Amino acid sequence: MAPNRRTAVARAGTNIALVKYWGKRDDKLNLPRTGSLSLTLAGLETVTSVSVDPGLQHDHFELDGHIERGVPLGRVGRFLAIVRERAGAAGQFSRVVSRNSFPTAAGLASSASGFAALACAASAAYGLDLSPEQLSALARRGSGSAARSIFGGFVEMDPGVLPEGDDAVAHELVPPAGWNLRLVVAVTTEAAKDVSSSTGMAATEETSPLYEAWVASHGIDLEEARLAVVGRDLQVLGAVMERNCLGMHACMMAARPPLLYWNEATLAALREVWNLRARGVPVWFTIDAGPHVKALCRVEEAAAVKTALDKVPGVARTIVAAPGDGVRLESVG
Ligand code: PMV
């Protein structure tokens, strides 16, 4: 039986997929069609506190100082209902307070750090004792990419084969200190995106004639990327990450109606990465379901990459992020 009153606080870093997940084999359980491989980042974090309060008639959700209602509250409430069911705590609602250190819903994967932190804080607040794998499966119910933010550094997500998805969990490939690369994020707008990942991936799966071809080539991408990470081969990893990302965006663009997350600065930043590479700088990009460009490079080149991307017209600012740790429970009591 869950305790009556308990507060837990957790912190999680966002992660950026170098080999993407796009499309689901089960919508309700949030089971991905493909595996994925990501890098968890330091400094781009969500801190979330969950307070179980017997006086509440429904869940409350505050994000970056705003009281959330509608869709965001609905998502958090449905997630907490899963935790309550497991904890045998039906009817015990919570107050959730979350803070992001970066723009929400603009393609910087705030749902990844958000649901990883929420999974960790909520399970502790409701008295569940979960292993990292169980936490990863739980976080996945909130957002597919959140399953990966449970772990630090380079992480692989397995799509699993079980119908209930207990094997659709992430695991660490290389810890944060194991390969000290940098991801330079070129922020091309501070606005939230129009089409959520869930809506975008459903539309792509249903209507894009290119989607099955991307899925068919995905296994090879994942295998090559995994070997490149384990072998610390940035050249191979970079080539795979660009082709996997461009393939995913090609699928979206071929959807009906077409889905284009890019703006003018996205294309200009992408070209700048190619220009840098033509001049001998080892740097490669990826782009998520949003307009920002994320460039992967060595520590030695990070300052030059940042300077170059800062000069691209339309780039509002850049953030240089190092590999970060997995989710942490900061306090419970
Ligand atoms: O975690 P979701 O459901 O918001 O989807 C994430 C989709 C991508 O960021 C585009 C790819 C990925 O693997 O993170």
Image (cartoon, grey):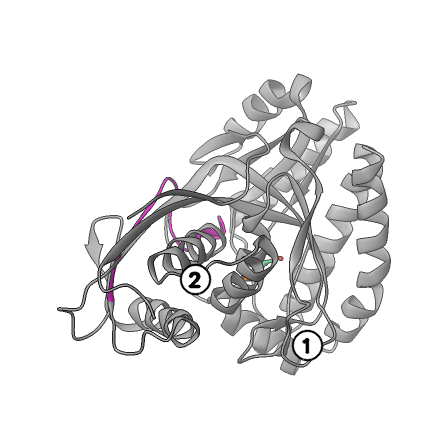
Which residue is at 80% across, 47% downward? 225
Return the mark for residue 275.
none
Image coordinates of residue 10 in percent, x first then y, are 39, 46
Question: In the rendered image, which residue does mark 1 sit on?
Answer: 208
Q: Are marks 1 and 2 in contact (CB under 8 Å)?
A: no
Instruction: Check disc 1: other Cα within 10 Å, few if <14, some if 14-19, many if 20+.
Output: many
Structural distance between the alpha carbons of marks 1 and 2: 41 Å
Q: Would you place residue 93 above or below residue 46 in this image?
A: below
Q: Is residue 150 magenta?
A: no
Query: Which residues make up the magenta segment?
Result: 94-110
The residue carrying mark 2 has its beta carbon less than 8 Å from ligand 1: no
Instruction: Check disc 2: other Cα within 10 Å, few if <14, some if 14-19, many if 20+.
Output: some
Q: Secondary structure at mark 2?
A: loop
Q: Amino acid at mark 2?
A: Leu
- Give the quadrant of residue 133: bottom right
Q: Is residue 103 magenta?
A: yes
Image coordinates of residue 316 in percent, x first then y, are 42, 36
Q: Quadrant of ligand 1?
A: bottom right
**The N terminus is located in which quarter?**
bottom left
Question: In the rendered image, which residue does mark 2 sit on?
Answer: 128
Taking 183 as reference, is 197 left or right?
A: left
Image coordinates of residue 116 in percent, x first then y, are 47, 54
Residue 209 visible, this angle: yes
Q: Amino acid at mark 1?
A: Ser
Residue in front for this viewpoint, 319 or 38 = 38
Looking at the image, is mark 1 or mark 2 nearer the viewer?
Answer: 2
Q: Would you place residue 286 above or below residue 289 in this image?
A: above
Residue in front for this viewpoint, 276 or 131 = 131
Q: Secondary structure at mark 1?
A: loop
Which residue is at 39% across, 42% downward? 102
Q: Residue furthest left?
A: 55
Residue 179 visible, this angle: no
